[in-house]
Amino acid sequence: MTAFRILGGRPLNGEIGIKGAKNAVLPLLAAALLVSGEVLLRDCPRLNDIDHMLEILAAIGCQVRWEGQNIAIDAGNAAEHRMPEELSKRMRSSIFMLGPALARFGKARFSYPGGCEIGLRPIDLHLSSLRAMGAQIIEERGHIYCSGKLIGAKIHLDYPSVGATENIMMAAVGAQGDTVIYNAAREPEIEDLAAFLNACGAEIKGAGQSSIEIRGGTPLKACEYVPLRDRIVAGTLLVGAAMTGGEVFAKGARAKDMQAVLQKLSEMGCTIGMEEGGVRVRGPKALKAVRRVETNPHPSFPTDMQAQIMSALCVARGSSVVVENVFESRFGHAAELCRMGADIQIDGKIAVVRGVKRLYGAKVVSRDLRGGAALTLAGLRAVGETIVTEVELIDRGYERMEEMLRCLGAGIERIETEE
Ligand code: EPZ
């Protein structure tokens, strides 16, 4: 099994280029199904989740290929409305294909995407919204059968779901008539999807706000597009600088996408530089605890940064409270951090973190993508050697994380372990 071996105690220092965001590129790949001609997405990260999405697109007849760091997709010959069973089960983001497949083929068959390490991940908001747009949807024996002509509708989301907002947007551009989404997700990746679709000829207004208006039926022509830079990868590396008392410049990161995270780092005593072309964080000699970090939909503190900030709070002076409001089981990293000497108490969605003087290297297990990243950061700060296993999970969201950290001065290498 693949693992990271980390020798702690070295500060992270230097500049790192941030690539396209996994959570922007995945919906863009699905949206290519709606576009005639060859789409080119520039400077994309090589991640397992992106390769899985490309496999799904190829399986339904799209021409897909990597050109260096760019991805070319031509959906002209796509004709298969049945999503490959194994692939769509293995990666829940394949649910993004539902809206575009319905808009393109008038029908779609999916296997129910399973939950994952951080929660059940239901898709009721996706299905109820598409039904409101005229789709007939039958859920039977682990499969979802959808069909029907999509008609624009006014849709109110009970919860500002990122994936549901993206699915509705993509379905709506292929529907007859106009759609309005109320209580839409406001994440930067939503704005990026709208910007891509508008660059292809769509008419979408209000993305990034709570209400989004989408004109249906406009033909979409392929374009070249540079996806949004990854605010979570950038945030992870900047937390690394904070924890190790170093200074890192995340080139390409946009401060406006990361305000809640930068605010917390500033409260913890970090010096924040919002510069032209990137974001800089310098860690203090000693981090300060914060009264509370609560995860909620954007622009609140992002759930995808909860594990990483918890790691930093473990070595801050004082006690902090971390509240995970978005997913029901996203504290898998806490027990592993305690194995390194952290002092964390969990009660439901609340974690109380009492800062300790130091963490000690240990063998720890990644329970999920961001939890694995958080344990890696803890290893950079710990005394001695840390082994982080199940690195395949980290590879889903970070392209060669060990190389990024090594070029910032970390003592880290990728190893194969026996078991
Ligand atoms: C996206 O997942 C991201 N994934 C997640 O990133 C991120 O954590 C999440 O948004 C929240 O920001 C991608 O973009 C590929 P949601 P998504 O629908 O769309 C509940 C990472 O680490 N819900 O906003 O699945 C759901 O259970 C990943 O990069 C319903 O109840 O998130 C959860 O509690 C992890 N019914 C909450 O909403 C639904 O139909 C947020 O889910 C849909 C969601």
Image (tube, helix red, strand yellow):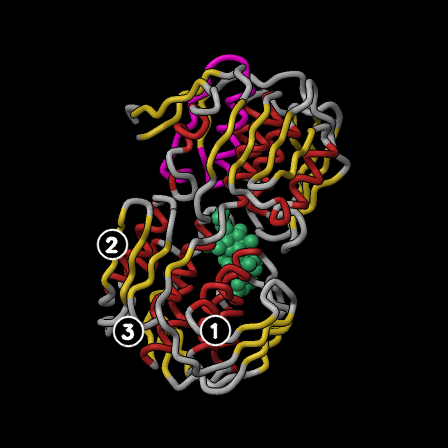
* Residue drawn at the location 53% of the way across and 69% of the way down: 125
Query: Relative to residue 276, is residue 138 depicted above or below?
Result: below
Q: Percent position (x, y) of residue 120?
A: 49, 56
| Residue 100 among magenta residues | no
Q: Looking at the image, which is closer to me, 54 or 118? A: 54
Q: CA distance from mark 3 to mark 1?
A: 17 Å
Mark found first going from the N terminus, 3 or 2: 2
In this view, the residue in front, 220 or 342, is 220
Name the residue that disc number 2 marks: 65
The residue at which mark 1 appears reads as 127
Q: Are marks 3 and 1 in contact (CB under 8 Å)?
A: no
Q: Which residue is mark 3?
A: 81
Over which residues does the magenta segment extend? 366-394
Q: Secondary structure at mark 2?
A: strand
Q: Left or right: 94 with respect to 361?
A: left
Disc 1 to disc 2, C-alpha distance:
31 Å
